[in-house]
Amino acid sequence: MTIDRYGIRSEAELIAAALKLGAGDAGGPLKSEEAKIAGAHSDVTLPTADMGKIEADIQNGLDPLGFIFAELRSPDRRREDGATYTPTVIVKQMMEWAKSKPAPARIVDPGVGSARFLAAAGSAFPDAELVGIDLDPIATLMTRANLNVLGMGKRSKVLLGDFRNFAAKAKGATLYIGNPPYVRHHQISPSWKEWLSREAGLMGLKSSKLSGLHVHFFLATAVRAQPGDYGAFITSAEWLDVNYGALVRSLFVDRLGGTSLTVLEPETQPFPDALTSAAITTFEIGTSDASASVRRIADIKKLKNIGTGKKIARERLATETRWSHLTRTLERPAEGWVELGEICRVHRGTVTGANGVWIAGEHSVGLPDSVLYPSITKAREVLESGGTLKPGHKLRNVIDIPADLDELDSEERKAVVKFLKTARSMGGDKGYVARHRRAWWAVGLRSAAPIISTYMARRAPGFTVNDANARHINIAHGLYPRDAMSDELRDALVNFLQTGVSQQMGRTYAGGLTKFEPREMERLVVPSPELLLEGVGALH
């Protein structure tokens, strides 16, 4: 463990070590909070610390203070602050891209952490001013210490604050580089959400209050940057596809002048504490390039030549609502293999709008069987089915009442009317979904799908033969054959899908969740029906 290597065993000792390495002598005057912390730790003893080893490793390009911090502060706590530290190998390759550009007058890291990016950039560009910004005073003290040991303290400014407030100008080009903090929208104050909406609106763009902090940082960069500035950020890749990421996608196409996207699969571990895909985004303000380069890698050893890849026209990027699929190089299917969509249509299950109302329970006792439909309501019901959902499988019922109550006989209608009073008291008529139905009580379940799959999990999707004739709500997808399908063919297809689909084929979000949208699932390559019946799928 790092703490054993260096002998630093608490955050108090980490702060004391940073002070001994000259944190107070680099990056400009300490802010009051930094000074307060420094004063409180100036007398902390370091009985087991190997300061010589720490200093030597910093000079050799390592980040012992950051490594220690990452071990002392739990991943959950650091995730709350968006403090996810980037592996050195990724920092190095992002810097190789930056070094291919003209030397900047200034380098800005908007979420500096322990200065992994800023220290590497300072070494690459010995004449540039260095600016590191962070909200965590321990991070800024580590940054100051690292820059002092490297002899960069006098040309650096370390700011304890929020990058969105940063407005300093530079004489010459600025390089923006780093790992903007990943903080979910729940932890962002209403005032900053209003800032996002206002600043995006001034550019003629729309924003979402569901945007994470990394979206704010992309926008803040676009607001401050000038023609000739350039940069590289590594973030979670989810903005490529989610609705709130539309703002970043628009900025990439236009205002930021995005030049490349490199998507790193989860197995590369771009963020050691989170199984997620990452995206390295490069941009050059004012670029006139008509296209951008995109690629995807699953082996960290192949992370070289950032900025290269297949060219995608900027006009196409502007019209696509999801970008992940653009980064995949789809090989031509082998002879006899086809896309799943040629065999089956894939539909997500019905949105009830209020599962507590429309999944049967004590509140619905007395409803007739004619409005109760055994349904897949939990992903584990698919995952634990063993590949076949058999008749009699214990499932919950979803209540689906016809829009026209006259379709019911008198006794059924009486029971339904009684239930609807209860449903209304539970708010079943109030939600967005209910208000946009033909009748607020008509859930409108799809017909039973012969094959049902999961589509979001920390694993590959599960598939099951639906012998139980179950319906499904929106926690699952239904696969509906385009042509009549024999039981033998259906079973062979499910057998293939159970083993022939990997997690890497979907989109992985922060936290390791992998998602397959219906159209993405339809693009999966499978043996043709003829090959499946010959047993090819079983041998895959």
Image (tube, helix red, strand yellow):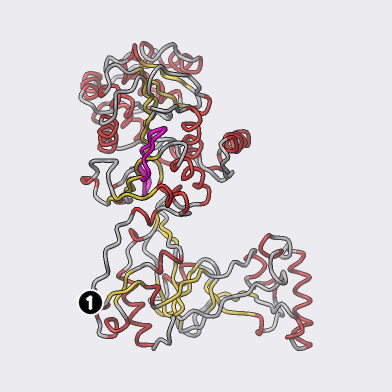
Would you say 16 lies left or right of 169 here?
Answer: left
Residue flagged by tag 1: what amino acid is it? Leu
Residue 66, horizontal then vertical, whole percent? 33, 29
User: Image height check: is 453 above or below 409?
Assistant: above
> 457 above or below 283?
below
Spot occupied by residue 424 in the image (x, y as percentages of width and height)? 76, 66
Disc 1: CA contacts within 10 A as few (<14), some (14-19) or many (>=20)? few
Q: Is residue 48 visible?
A: no
Q: Which residue is mark 1?
A: 539
Start-end of magenta stretch: 272-291
82 or 262, which lies in front? 262
**Which one is nearer the viewer's eye here, 78 or 10?**
78
Rendering coords of residue 472 (x, y %): 53, 73
The image position of residue 177, as x and y in percent, is 37, 31
Q: Nearer the viewer, residue 464 or 396?
A: 464
Report the residue at 37% width, 61% height from top: 459
**Quadrant (top left, top right, bottom left, bottom right) of the N terminus:** top left
Q: Residue at x 42, y 18 (%)?
A: 170
Identified at 22% across, 21% down, the residue is 59
Tag 1 secondary structure: helix
